[in-house]
Amino acid sequence: MDIPTSERLATIQNQIRLVEAEKLECEQRLVLFWEHLSPIDPALVVVAMLRIQRRIRALEDSKRDLLKEQQALIMQATTHLAPSHRED
């Protein structure tokens, strides 16, 4: 595997960890809104919860894209490393 590919794979893995951490934080914020719904204006809570849910969906999309890129890079690297099975 070439250096740029291995560096990109490491970067992708780090980005996935960051996305997962931010998603967890968003999910925890949603729980807090549910727990403290009564003392807060319900309309404000709904707006905030919808914003958080949209962010969670965006993070999930980002993670899915990163995983696709990671898989493509791995497939590309293994294809280049595999011995040729051509019959001439």
Image (cartoon, rainbow, N blue to C red):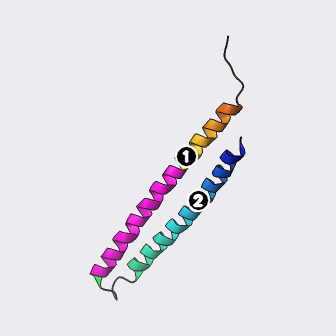
- Residue density around tag 2, few if under 14, some if 14–19, many if 20 or more, within 10 Å: some
On the image, the x and y values in percent for residue 16 come to 57, 58
Q: From the image, give the main secondary structure of the stretch colored magenta.
A: helix
What type is the residue that disc 2 sits on? Answer: Gln
Per the image, label 2 sits on a secondary structure element best described as helix
Region rendered in magenta: 43-66
Query: Which quarter of the figure is the N terminus placed in?
Result: top right
- Residue ID for mark 2: 15
10 Å crowding of disc 1: few (<14), some (14-19), many (20+):
some
Residues at marks 2 and 1, CA–CA distance in whole angstroms: 12 Å
Mark before the other along the chain sequence, 2 or 1:
2
Q: Please report the residue visible at 56 percent of the width from the left and 67 percent of the height from the top.
A: 21
Q: Nearer the viewer, residue 8 or 64?
A: 8
Q: Is residue 62 magenta?
A: yes
Q: Nearer the viewer, residue 11 or 58?
A: 11
For residue 48, which numbered disc appears in the image?
Answer: none
Residue 69, numbered circle? 1
